[in-house]
Image (cartoon, rainbow, N blue to C red):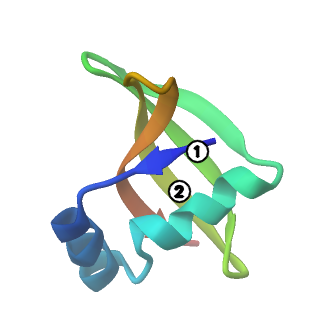
Amino acid sequence: MRFRSDSAKDREVKRKHGISLKEAQQIFDQVHLVDRKNDDPEQFRAIGWSGGQLCSVIFEIRRDREDEFHHLIAAWKASK
């Protein structure tokens, strides 16, 4: 599975929510829940574990010349 994200957005998400988009990629390495968040553009939410913390990540599935990839948009640590 391939991932992409904007580096400036990655730093902003880390500063704002305490988890980077790069760290949030760990969610996809294990059992996780995915549901559809939005239809235009089509976005999904994954909930799973990253660094021992339950987290959510918003992503889009995009395509390029190589194949599909997950474009990560936002991530945050789950709250109570």
For marks 2 and 1, give the CA distance: 6 Å
Asked if marks 2 and 1 touch (Cβ < 8 Å), the reply is: yes
Crowd band around label 1 with a 10 angstrom C-alpha radius: few (<14), some (14–19), many (20+): many
Residue holding disc 2: 56
Above or below — where is 24 with respect to 71? below
Residue 39 in the image, given as x and y percentages of width and height: 34, 15
Residue ID at (68%, 51%): 28
The quadrant the N terminus occupies is top right
Residue 14 in the image, given as x and y percentages of width and height: 33, 79
Residue 9 in the image, given as x and y percentages of width and height: 21, 64
Identity of the residue furthest to the front in this view? 65
What amino acid is found at the position of numbered circle 1 in the picture?
Ala
Q: Secondary structure at mark 1?
A: strand
Residue ID at (24%, 57%): 6
Identity of the residue furthest to the top in this view? 39
Residue 76 occupies quadrant: bottom left
User: In this rendering, would 54 be left or right of 17?
Assistant: right
Residue 5 marker: none
User: In this rendering, would 22 be left or right of 40?
Assistant: right
Residue 46 marker: 1
Residue ID at (42%, 65%): 21
Residue ID at (71%, 41%): 33
Residue 10 in the image, given as x and y percentages of width and height: 29, 69
